[in-house]
Amino acid sequence: MFPSLKKKFDFKAHEEEIEDLDMSTGSKKLVTVGRDFTCSVWSGNQLVTGLNWHETLPQIAEKSYRYMACRFGNCEDENDALRLYTVQIPHKRDKKPPPCYITKWDGKIFLPMLTSPCGTEVISSLALR
């Protein structure tokens, strides 16, 4: 655990490689994005929830997109509110690529608040300010 860099937990988060992870400051939640199509929110080594962004877009088939990046952020208009942002990219690239998406999540109940297309170029990282 930061700053000592000593391992605090040892648990299996994903079936494949972890693409990205982020830790919230106030609520001490950890979010992980894996190549196994999953994005998970953790409290310590306990799974809080798995995210399901595609449920808000029924025209998108399950496993046609995967999570690529994740970041927690504070809400400007609510001091104690937490938001989570994720990037979803097409699992397979076509000659005419489909759009990538960015999703804003409620950081308490982890339901999607807004999903928007963000172009056809694959976004490989995400930064918030």
Image: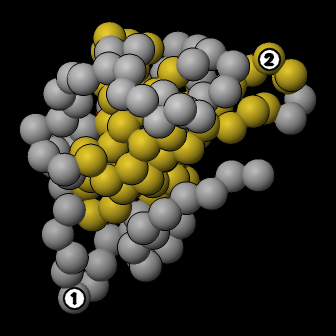
The residue at 31%/53% (across/down) is 19
N-terminal of the pair, mark 1 or mark 2, is 2
Q: Quick check: 50 above or below 99?
A: above
- Residue 58 is situated, as x and y percent measured from the top left of the image, at 30, 40
Q: Is residue 110 above or below residue 120?
A: above
Q: Picture coordinates of residue 65 (x, y %)?
A: 25, 54
Q: Amino acid at mark 1?
A: Lys
Task: Tell me the tag on residue 80.
Answer: 2
Q: Looking at this view, name the residue that lies furthest to the left.
A: 15
Q: Which residue is found at the position 53% from the left and 32% from the top?
A: 4
Res 102 seen here: yes
Residue on which disc 1 sits: 95
| Image coords of residue 68 (percent x, y) | 36, 55
At horizontal 47% and vertical 36% (from top left) the residue drawn is 5
Q: Is residue 6 left or right of residue 104?
A: left
Residue 87 lies left or right of residue 51; in this view the side is right
Q: How is the image coloured?
A: secondary structure
Crowd tier of the residue under label 1, counting other residues whose Cα lies within 10 Å: few below 14, some 14–19, many 20 or above: few
